[in-house]
Image (cartoon, grey):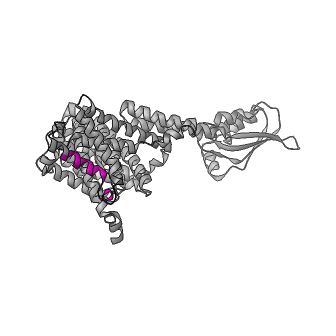
Amino acid sequence: MLLSVKQNWFTNVRGDLLAGIVVALALVPESIAFSIIAGVDPKVGLYASFCIAVVIAFTGGRPGMISAATGAMALLMVTLVKEHGLEYLLAATILTGVLQIIAGYLKLGSLMRFVSRSVITGFVNSLAILIFMVQLPELTNVTWHVYAMTLAGLGIIYLFPYIPVIGKLMPSALVCILTLTAVALYWGIDIRTVGDMGDLPDTLPIFLWPEVPLTLKTLMIIFPYSVMLMAVGLLESMLTATIVDDMTDTKSDKNRECKGQGVANIIAGGFGGMAGCAMIGQSVINIKSGGRTRLSTLTAGLVLLVLVVFLSDFLSIIPMAALVAVMIMVSIGTFSWKSIIDLKKHPISTNIVMLTTVAVVVSTHNLALGVFIGVLLAAMFFANKVGHYMVVNKGELGDGTRVYTVLGQVFFASSSKFIESFDLKEPIEKVVIDLTAAHFWDITAVESLDRVVIKMREQGAEVELLGLNEASATIVDRFGTHDDAKRLARVLAKH
């Protein structure tokens, strides 16, 4: 027990504390921006980010991953807030948490194994592009000071780690924020700051049950939104967990993460926050700044609360250019540049899946839709590829018996090829179908076998099946009709 606590919390204390501070600073403008997208007060996003980050540090299944209010979730809330108001959003957030806990107990986190690497790469690349695009308004129609500060920030971020000794003491992103803030104050540079984005809360959040009637009508209003929030939240969280797994060469508990996200959203909704999920951008910042354990996530949440409630005066003077530089670094670090080189080496189907995922996510800003289409395409390409590997060889025994040897997987994608491989009109007395090297996967495959056997029997042939493996035999016996006595009698009665 003590060993587990130490491993999950105290193996990287200094790195986690510093990384958590960086993440907290970067969370502020994003939380405010996502609140504006959802059409609610900035404190709703800030309270949500604090609650979710703190709770997920204890309940989540992926140490070092950052969860808070996100843009993907905010986009789904716009209509609900506009038509029914904040209280219904808070109720939907709590229901979202309940559904996510149920998903965790149903082990839906295990479904991540069906998401191919090409879809994950497309998801990562599209998020990197979106993160960069979100920064463009801060770089449009501004003075030259903003560009100079942003470039200086990028210079600090990438060059500071190379400075002997001190380059390893602090995360370069934190140095960037502190340095540019000091420069802006010293020179009195008039540029946009965090304080310009909206009023920061000045009190701690308090627990209040949403003021909505507990009726079936209320449930019918919030349930569709909660289902969408649950799906998008879990999808983004599971994909982010997979990416952090790769970055840290460690494993995570996806089903525990589902439950943890649910608990976090329930508490966030009770404390006046909007629904949230894992954030790939902030998680990358955390990992690249040295964060590894749950302590970094907890630190990010607690420092965020201290900043917005007790140190809002300091927080409000941080130049947005400094945070833009940090997010551009995240965008560059998140994008899989190797995937561009791999376009020449990978199969065309893999490239299509990756590029389609990127195109859909970037054009619609809908992560769930992009990943769904990517998974669907990957499944179609896989089914088509496996279907081509099914072969039926035709032979003959010495006594004139026709022998068909089936090799490969028989399922919906190869069923037509399976049927076409047999000469169903050949006048022959006996046919042997050798299925030793074949496997039947679904009802479509069983129906194909039925069709072949019955057609041959209608021609007067005696058909014998050999070598059907146990798994295939189970589905054939259950759903097959070629050995059904009544139907067989009708077939034989024709001869």
Provide the residue span drawn in magenta: 163-182
SS assignment for the magenta stretch, majority: helix
Instruction: Classify residue 481 as left or right of residue 315.
Output: right
Name above or below for residue 135 compared with residue 4.
Answer: above
Looking at the picture, does residue 315 appear above or below residue 359?
A: below
Give the quadrant of the C terminus.
Answer: top right
Provide residue 328's location: percent of width, then percent of height.
33, 41
Residue 14 locus on image (x, y percent): 29, 62
Q: Nearer the viewer, residue 354 or 78?
A: 354
Count of numbered circles in the view: 0
Tell me where residue 250 sits by quadrant. bottom left
Q: Is residue 426 left or right of residue 336?
A: right
Q: Quadrant of residue 443?
A: top right
**Residue 24 in picture, x, y percent from top left:** 24, 50
| 453, above or below 238, in the image | above
The answer to whether one can see residue 208 in this image is no
Residue 191, compared with residue 330, is above or below; it is above
Quadrant of the rendered image containing residue 55: bottom left
Residue 137 part of the magenta-drawn span: no
Name the side, left or right, on which 63 lies relative to 386.
Answer: left
Look at the image and say whether residue 169 sits in the magenta stretch: yes
Residue 335 can be seen in this image? yes
Q: Residue furthest top?
A: 141
The residue lying at 28 percent from left, 39 percent from top is 150
| Nearest the eye: 159 or 274 | 159
**Residue at the (47%, 33%) spot, across then down:** 356
Q: Quadrant of the N terminus?
A: bottom left
What residue is at 73 percent from the left and 39 percent from the top? 392
